[in-house]
Image (spheres, rainbow, N blue to C red):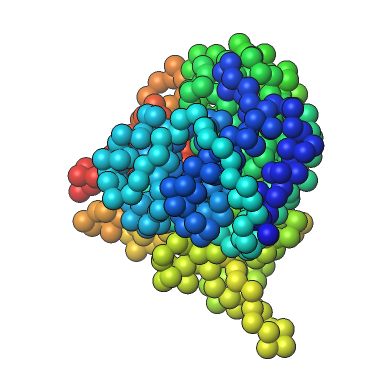
């Protein structure tokens, strides 16, 4: 039978055929047109040899053509691996080495570079979909629990890993999020997030599986986003902390943009800094807010009920349907309310593994130590590496990454705790704290800060604040004022790049 994702898309086309699926600039592509394009791409991929289970690497910005190509890979029973269009050539080379693709698809801006960088793999340019569809191509024997997509992690703490998700996981995750958000057929989602990032991909799934119109900006900047809002009147804005920081920085055109069509603003990828969140509340004061948690390895894990976003912005709420989230101590026991431990995800969204990396998979995807059901094999759980805690009412709070802990002066320091304290001082818009190798301390705590607009140099006051409020081992020894954080291809702060700012200065 056809895989779940392709079957669901065909059902969407039957319901919504003449409605717009994707709009971008002055282009509008209906669901029926997208289906035809996908069938043509699928036929071309098959003629180039793509077989069920083989990988197709795609390097492209978001566009109707990219959507059709993704659907074409599903139609062939292939496994798609997306590379961010702003990623360096080394990431493309790494992705090709990991996935061993049969083909590479690239848009016109990237096709030549792709062919030169990975010359052993045929490269097909993502031009207009031509040719005749092949009869029966979408009815290949692909099981719902077989791999559908490979997403690459941001690589901020090492080489990007290829997170493999199944058709069933992606479909169930999409439906769970849609239920949580109350998506409607008439909704129009503005997606400024690359589809190569699983959260951006989730917005595309909402379109092809549920029939929601996708609005794409023509560029990844605040002016293009605001133009898309004015021209296409989206009802939902999908965001990340870095996107809200971009939209609300300085004299952003967003402050003069009519955002009245937007009913819901969503966020994932980390908590929004309080100063920026305050601006979000002002600009989108009429909107519901959805604060979410997940990682590439779990797709989507939790969401805060929209009616509580203003009351509990520090929390990511509760597990999505079909998901169990627990906080475990190092010995595998369940942590008490208020006790910090590792967040463990079971159920819908648990990834199949890191493609081609069995040892790395075994460290993250492993049996739940508390499982004891009559000798039955325990289902896999994802040990996220994220630290968090639950309160007495079950609300989940995130405290940061285990692999970001700093060991300074012999004591483990949570950079998230230092960041939270600095934000509470209300002297800067945002802060990123890292550990830098230090001859005497082991690691030195260092802080890169984004200053308040038109404000004085915040560093003297920050140093005084840290001396008053933080233990000696938690106090940043170096500060650097920057305009914006360097970002990974997935739009998250690049802590390795932040750390590099301080390298060579620690003595």
Rendered-image quadrant of the N terminus: bottom right
Q: 36 and 181: which one is in front?
A: 36
Displayed quadrant of residue 225: top right
> Which residue occupies 51% across, 16% down?
223
Kindly tell me whether residue 344 is visible in this rendering.
yes
Q: Vertical placement of 207 versus 382: above or below?
A: above
The image shows residue 187, relative to residue 364, as above or below, that is above
Q: Is residue 5 left or right of residue 187?
A: left
Residue 179, given in percent of the width and then of the height, sits at 78, 46
Q: Position of residue 334 (x, y in %)?
A: 65, 71
How many marks the image carries: the answer is 0
Residue at far top of view? 256
State the residue lying farthest toward the bottom.
Answer: 375
Q: Is residue 338 visible?
A: no
Q: Nearer the viewer, residue 175 or 285?
A: 175
Measured as percent of width and height from the top left, residue 86 is found at 39, 35
- Quadrant of res 476: top left
Residue drawn at point x = 75 percent, y = 44 percent: 11
Question: Could you say where residue 323 lies in the image, as x and y percent from the top left?
Answer: 70, 60
The foreground one among 93 and 159 is: 93
Judge by depth and name the residue closer to the eye, 470 or 94: 94
Q: Residue at x 55, y 24 (%)?
A: 217
Q: What residue is drawn where x is 61% and y is 75%?
A: 368
134 sits left or right of 503 in the view: right
**Does residue 177 sit above or below 394 in this rendering?**
above
């Amino acid at each position: 039978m056809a895989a779940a994702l392709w079957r669901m898309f065909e059902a969407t086309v039957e319901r919504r055929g003449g409605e717009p699926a994707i709009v971008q600039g002055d282009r509008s592509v209906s669901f029926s047109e997208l289906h035809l394009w996908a069938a043509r791409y699928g036929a071309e991929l098959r003629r180039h040899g793509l077989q069920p289970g083989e990988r197709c690497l795609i390097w492209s910005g978001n566009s109707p053509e990219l959507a059709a190509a993704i659907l074409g890979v599903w139609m062939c029973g292939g496994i798609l691996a997306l590379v961010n269009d702003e990623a360096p050539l080394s990431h493309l080379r790494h992705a090709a080495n990991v996935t061993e693709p049969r083909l590479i698809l690239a848009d016109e801006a990237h096709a030549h570079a792709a062919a030169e960088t990975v010359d052993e793999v045929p490269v097909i340019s993502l031009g207009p979909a031509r040719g005749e569809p092949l009869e029966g191509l979408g009815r290949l024997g692909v099981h719902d629990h077989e791999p559908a997509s490979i997403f690459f992690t941001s690589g901020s703490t090492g080489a990007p890993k290829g997170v493999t998700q199944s058709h069933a996981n992606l479909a169930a995750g999409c439906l769970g999020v849609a239920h949580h958000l109350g998506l409607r057929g008439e909704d129009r989602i503005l997606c400024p997030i690359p589809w190569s990032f699983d959260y951006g991909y989730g917005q595309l799934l909402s379109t092809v599986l549920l029939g929601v119109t996708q609005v794409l900006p023509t560029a990844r900047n605040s002016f293009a986003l605001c133009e898309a809002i004015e021209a296409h009147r989206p009802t939902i804005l999908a965001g990340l902390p870095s996107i809200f920081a971009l939209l609300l920085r300085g004299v952003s055109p967003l402050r003069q943009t009519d955002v009245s069509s937007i009913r819901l603003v969503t966020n994932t990828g980390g908590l929004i800094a309080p100063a920026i969140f305050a601006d979000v509340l002002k600009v989108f004061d009429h909107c519901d807010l959805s604060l979410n948690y997940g990682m590439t390895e779990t797709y989507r894990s939790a969401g805060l009920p929209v009616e509580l976003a203003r009351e509990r912005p520090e929390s990511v709420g509760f597990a999505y349907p079909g998901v169990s989230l627990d906080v475990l101590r190092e010995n595998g026991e369940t942590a008490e309310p208020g006790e910090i431990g590792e967040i463990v995800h079971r159920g819908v969204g648990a990834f199949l593994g890191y493609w081609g990396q069995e040892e790395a998979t075994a460290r993250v995807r492993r049996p739940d130590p508390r499982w004891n059901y009559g000798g039955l094999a325990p289902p896999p759980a994802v040990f996220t590496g994220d630290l968090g805690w639950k309160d007495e009412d079950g609300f989940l709070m995130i405290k940061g990454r285990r692999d970001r802990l700093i060991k300074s002066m012999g004591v483990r320091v949570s950079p998230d705790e230092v960041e939270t304290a600095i934000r509470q001082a209300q002297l800067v818009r945002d802060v990123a704290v890292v550990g830098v190798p230090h001859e005497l301390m082991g690691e030195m705590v260092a802080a890169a800060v984004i200053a308040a607009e038109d404000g004085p140099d915040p560093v003297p006051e920050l140093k005084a604040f840290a001396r008053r409020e933080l233990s000696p081992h938690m106090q940043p020894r170096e500060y650097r004022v920057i305009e914006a954080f360097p970002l990974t291809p997935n739009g998250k702060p690049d802590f390795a790049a932040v750390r590099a700012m301080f390298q060579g200065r620690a003595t």
